[in-house]
Amino acid sequence: MFAEVVGGILSGSLALIADAGHMLTDAASIGLALGALHFSSRAPSAERTFGYRRLEILAALINALTLWLIAGWVAFEAYHRVQEVPDVEGGLMLAVGSIGLVVNIAAAWILHGSAEHSVNVEGAFQHVMADLLGSVGVVISGILVWAFGWTLADPIISVVIGGLIVLSTWRLLGKVIHILLEGVPEHIDVYRLCHEMEGVDGVVVIHDIHVWSVAPGYDVLTAHVIVDPEFDVEGIADVRRRLRQIATGDYGINHITIQMETRPEGCTEQDHVDHLHARSSSEYTAFLKFPLMKERKNG
């Protein structure tokens, strides 16, 4: 990073300075990722019943937004340089950019394996990958300036680097927002989950089901389950055990809360999604006869 700052000033290259600024955020993002991982392992408390697990998501969000700010700054500077193209020392720019490329390849190789299991580490990895692309752009720009004297290549390549930065973080930002909105994890099909749970002997219908991620790798499920009123306490306990086995064993859900009911009266929660409305079974028809669902259907 320091080599690119000095090289960018001496050579007059915006691409080198932009890449150096990006390297600075790389270091910050890796530090942020490490800090979030450290605090996310702390035990839950009365004030934070899920602990600090969501810090990992916030760190990834900060990483993504920081990259977009950098891309905007590069585009702004490049616009001014297109208006008035400065002299650029292509040889020095090429030499320093090549060193940066080697460093970023090594950093990307180190982070690649862990990025598949954590959006937090993926945020740091995306920083490094965007920086690697930036280094490639610097090298190409250096060649064009050094070999052909085309100094306009420097701001143009800088804009390309900024665009690549935005594109590289688009998917990451989408995943982060999906988790913050408590969307269903990608690997879980709620319709299939409800179908399998309702296939358990004694289960009449599943309603008020919620599935979301507190953090990557930590999924949560809550659901209300209406069981056959003829089941005794032992039978209901067996149903609950089998439902937990499905959620944990087949779907990898970590935190499960199941409310067992024999009738829906008194159940004020009405987040039934469209699973119930899509059903045509006799159990669903019977379920609609209860006051709660009658009111919801009429409303």
Image (cartoon, helix red, strand yellow):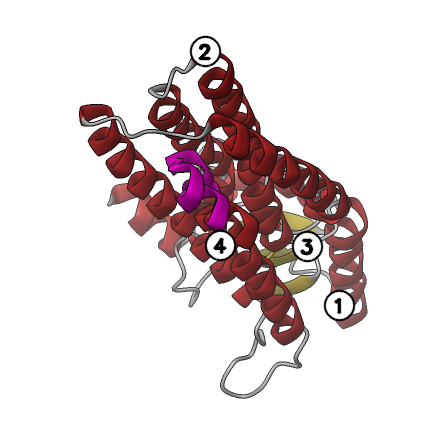
Binning the other alpha carbons within 10 Å of mark 3 as few (below 14), some (14 to 19) or many (20 upward) gives: some
CA–CA distance between discs 1 and 3?
36 Å
**Which contiguous range is marked in magenta?**
6-19
The residue under label 1 is 232
For marks 4 and 3 on the same chain, the one whose residue lies earlier in the sequence: 4
Q: Residue at x 44, y 64 (%)?
A: 267
For marks 1 and 3 on the same chain, the one whose residue lies earlier in the sequence: 3
For marks 3 and 2 on the same chain, the one whose residue lies earlier in the sequence: 2
Above-or-below relation of 133 to 65: above
Frontmost of labels 4 and 2 is: 2
Q: Amino acid at mark 4?
A: Thr
Which disc number belongs to residue 148?
Answer: 2
Which disc number belongs to residue 217?
Answer: 3
Frontmost of labels 4 and 3 is: 4
For marks 1 and 2 on the same chain, the one whose residue lies earlier in the sequence: 2
Q: Residue at x 30, y 43 (%)?
A: 73
Label 3–label 2 contact, CB within 8 A: no
The residue under label 4 is 25
Magenta segment's dominant SS is helix
- Whether residue 263 appears in this view of the structure is no
In the picture, the quarter occupied by the C terminus is: top left
Frontmost of labels 3 and 2 is: 2
What is the secondary structure assignment of the residue under circle 3? loop
CA–CA distance between discs 4 and 3?
26 Å
CA–CA distance between discs 3 and 2?
51 Å
Q: Amino acid at mark 2?
A: Phe
